[in-house]
Image (cartoon, rainbow, N blue to C red):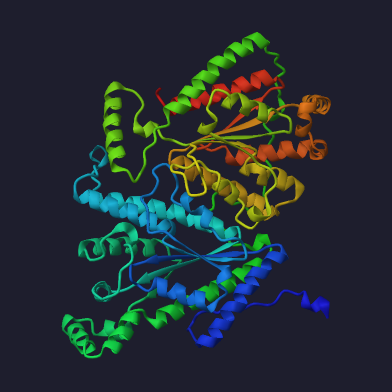
Amino acid sequence: MAKNDDKPVAIQADPLSQFHMDEQTLRLALVEAQYGLRDTRAQGQATGLLVLINGMELSGKGVAVSQLRQWVDPRLLNVEATLGNMPAKYEPLWQEHVEKLPRHGNITAYFGNWYSDLITGVMQRIAASKEGDIKTKEGNGQDATADWKAYLAQQLQTLSRFEADLQNNHTQVLKCWFHIDEATLQRRLQDQQQDPTWLYKMDWQDKTAVHAFNEIAKVILAQQSDWVVIDGSDAPLAANASKDNIDAKDSDKNTDKQTDKQTNDSIGYSEQATLQFCHEVLHSTQQALISSQQIDSEQRLPKMTYNQHAAFSWADVPDKLIAIDDADMDKVDYQKALAKKQARLATLLRARYHPIHRHDNNKKDKQSEKTADNKQQGTATEETLNHHVIFAFEGMDAAGKGGAIKRLVAPLDPREYQVYNIAAPTENELQHPYLWRFWTRLPQFEPCLKQERLSRVAIFDRTWYGRVLVERIEGFASEAAWQRAYDEINRMEEDLADNGTVILKYWLAIDKKEQLERFEDRKETPHKHFKLTDDDWRNRDKWQDYVQAAADMLARTNTKHAPWHVVATNDKRTARLAVLDHAIKQLEKRIDA
């Protein structure tokens, strides 16, 4: 009997051909699905549900989510909200929001989200174009409308790729767009209820702004077919939306204060819209349950995935991974060169740091004046400054990653950078998409509430490439997961690079004999004991596997926006200077300082 009880429950998702459930049946189904989703955490492959809630102001979004929270266990439904900020200039749209992603097994309803930031940015572009602030590039004939539409289309493509990667990593995404007609909007703006702080930082009584918003909405809904559009209008009132009828109804209501109060409490907030929303959440929760019962190879692959092969083919091992230099640099020469290169690197890293706060117009104006002066003088401009910098170190055990990082940061103030020593993921990290623990460590333009300081330089000792290295070799990731990871990583790095982040990736290579000598040195040196683990010795037996995995990694992720630099030498001093030399050259390409 116990054996049968352990079998997974067969779940059929409601096809939503019609919303046939009455309130009590719907409430029960929601709670059962919610607890079923939570229980998947104990089964090893849980799935979370992210509900993105967007659309017009006063369209019933809050009413719908409030009702949902009344019908489910509120402890397992997290609600987050943002009104929409101007997109950070040097970060992908999604980056600011990754902390809000649901833990696997949970549901998060997220008002606003990255689409609010996108809409806010596009609205400003439209407003600026009307004031003549947006200039076309070198007279290419594109008008202001083409400018904002091209920007919007590109950002939507980026977000679609990001959301597809979420779904392939056990985060189901439901996107709900609430809409109301203009008459309903005007009626709700004129009622006696207090209005919230305006969404997208726009005046919803401005018909020109509302028209611009609806134009944006048309583009979004046309380009992304996965939105569920929910009509939040009140059907009886919407059918009699002329001004005379509305005035007549308002006159009748004034004769009965109680009726007036009841009407204002629910005016326009369609019960049908709320029921549709709750049915959609139920359906997506059921889909998430089904997803959690599938093996990883059955997960849906995004249509835009790059380089998807029917069968994985191993790359040839390049000479640079196995032809290891045996140089022996003189210590005096090394120290002289080291000091000079460290000073130059520190100058470059500091030259690219100019704090511009996106919400402070005065600072922006001052920076614009400074940028104009810099252009006249031929020095660094805003376009070449303010970039984040990411150093990513991978390599064989004892190849010198820690030593290279130590020399890299030596001339810097500790407040100027963050070093992340990446180990096995924590339980909380395992209950999010694989890349989540790296997304949350990316440098930020402005500190969030969980950060006490701003750091624009991030240094990773081991990185997101662990999925295609150690997790592949040790079997911690399925074949489908690590083979899919090459493209997921490329997309992440491309998003970062497209927004100005400088990504410097290093593979440090030594030969097997040199590794053994360094292991023995660590074993005999007290202050180095912590660097040597049982796993290090065990991994030596899989040396060729790691070399092959590195070759596959280089072949698939050595991209134009984030190329690899291989440092292959048994000499620590030569390796450290090679890292500094490369970093200096790459930063000099971006910064004239």
Q: Position of residue 64 (x, y in %)?
A: 43, 75
Task: Report which quarter residue 574 is drawn in.
Answer: top right
235 to the left or right of 127: right
| Image vertical order of residue 13 relative to residue 210, above or below | below
586 to the left or right of 76: left
Q: Residue furthest left?
A: 244
Q: Position of residue 225 (x, y in %)?
A: 43, 66
Question: Which residue is drawn at the image coordinates 62% and 67% (left, top)?
Answer: 291
Marker count (numbered): 0
In the picture, the quarter occupied by the N terminus is bottom right
Residue 302 visible from this viewpoint: no
Question: Which residue is drawn at the image coordinates 63% and 22% (left, top)?
Answer: 576
Q: Position of residue 349 (x, y in %)?
A: 47, 28
Residue 105 visible from this viewpoint: yes
| Image vertical order of residue 475 relative to residue 240, above or below | above
| Image vertical order of residue 117 relative to residue 289, above or below | above
Q: Nearer the viewer, residue 73 or 181?
A: 73
Question: Which residue is drawn at the image coordinates 24% and 49% (left, top)?
Answer: 128
| Image vertical order of residue 274 relative to residue 47, above or below | below
Q: Nearer the viewer, residue 267 or 17?
A: 267
Q: Position of residue 107 (x, y in %)?
A: 56, 67
In the picture, the quarter occupied by the C terminus is top left
Q: Residue furthest front?
A: 257
